[in-house]
Image: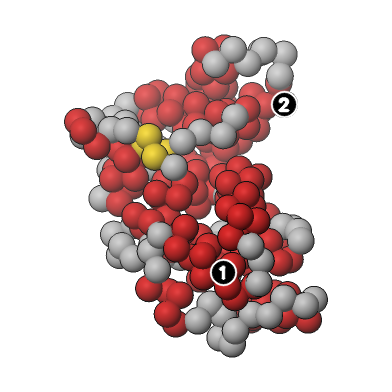
Amino acid sequence: MSSTPPSLPNDPQQLHEKIRTIARSVAAGLGIPLSREDLIEDTVSHVWTRLLEGKYNPTQGPFAAWCRRVCKNYLLDQIQPREITWTDLLAHSRGGSAGENNGDNDRTFSIEELFASSYNSPQVSLFAMPFCPDDLDKVRKWKPMRDRVIMLAASGLWVKAPEDEWNEWVQQVRENGTPLPNPFPPPEFLNLEDPSDRLGELAKMTRLSRNHLAVLWPRRCRQWLTKLRCIREVREE
């Protein structure tokens, strides 16, 4: 009995060509030159990864529609930052597919709202699992270290980092002259759901101005947070 879902070609080469054809079609629709073969192949590899991770559910629709969505999300991530919709988040939280129509819920919202909505919600898996190796590798490259610790604390994503590594990063920030309480973040900080409230508390803890953090947050969101797979998956699943 074949393990390949019925809507997929059994031959891996045929499946690869099918994905590649869809990726090229989506790229053309986004105005991306088809001469960007490197980007097309990266997109195909991304779809294969998602497929091997079991992200495609044939009971929720045809493969081509799912593949187009994954290709489009990936390509948009490469060419421009994209806002997440409430529809995407709601579908993610209940294990459904992005693109389901929820009427008034179908609006874009910022990454700040994403964190505020999911920070204390057991339904949303954004904070439920450790960073995947890919994301952890990206986070380890965030510099300066102080900004890394601030962004992880403000977003709540610090809980996804290995505990010993997180403590080491915090200690490095202390040694570099930024006074951070012990433990960090402190227990009362964890009750703050809104990133703007957390930034206010971080300003007091780090002795940085609130204005400085208000500028730092959106810039690092664009440069760092939106590149993480755990954030992208909220709008893919």
Callout 2 crowding tier (Cα within 10 Å): few <14, some 14–19, many ≥20: few
Q: Earlier in the sequence, mark 2 or mark 1?
A: 2
In the rendered image, residue 197, in percent from the top left (x then y), is placed at 45, 63
Which of the colour schemes (rainbow, by chain, secondary structure, one colour) is used? Answer: secondary structure
- Viewer-nearest residue: 7 or 24: 24
Name the residue that disc number 1 marks: 202
Name the residue that disc number 2 marks: 38
- Viewer-nearest residue: 12 or 231: 231
Considering every residue shown, the one lying at the far right of the view is 176
In the rendered image, residue 137, in percent from the top left (x then y), is placed at 68, 58
Q: Residue at x 62, y 27 (%)?
A: 79
Q: Residue at x 33, y 65 (%)?
A: 120
Q: Decide: is 103 above or below 190.
A: above
Is disc 1 placed on a helix, strand or loop?
Answer: helix
Q: Where on the picture, by quarter, is residue 132?
A: bottom right
- Viewer-nearest residue: 126 or 173: 173
Q: Residue at x 64, y 52 (%)?
A: 216
- Tell whether 70 sits left or right of 125: right
Type of amino acid at the residue the image marks with label 1:
Leu
Q: Decide: is 191 above or below 151.
A: below
Can residue 130 be spotted in the picture?
Answer: no
Q: CA distance from mark 2 to mark 1?
A: 41 Å
Check the picture and name the quadrant holding the C terminus.
top left
In the rendered image, residue 4, in percent from the top left (x then y), is placed at 40, 37
- Tell whether 216 sits left or right of 186: right
Check the picture and name the quadrant holding the N terminus.
top left
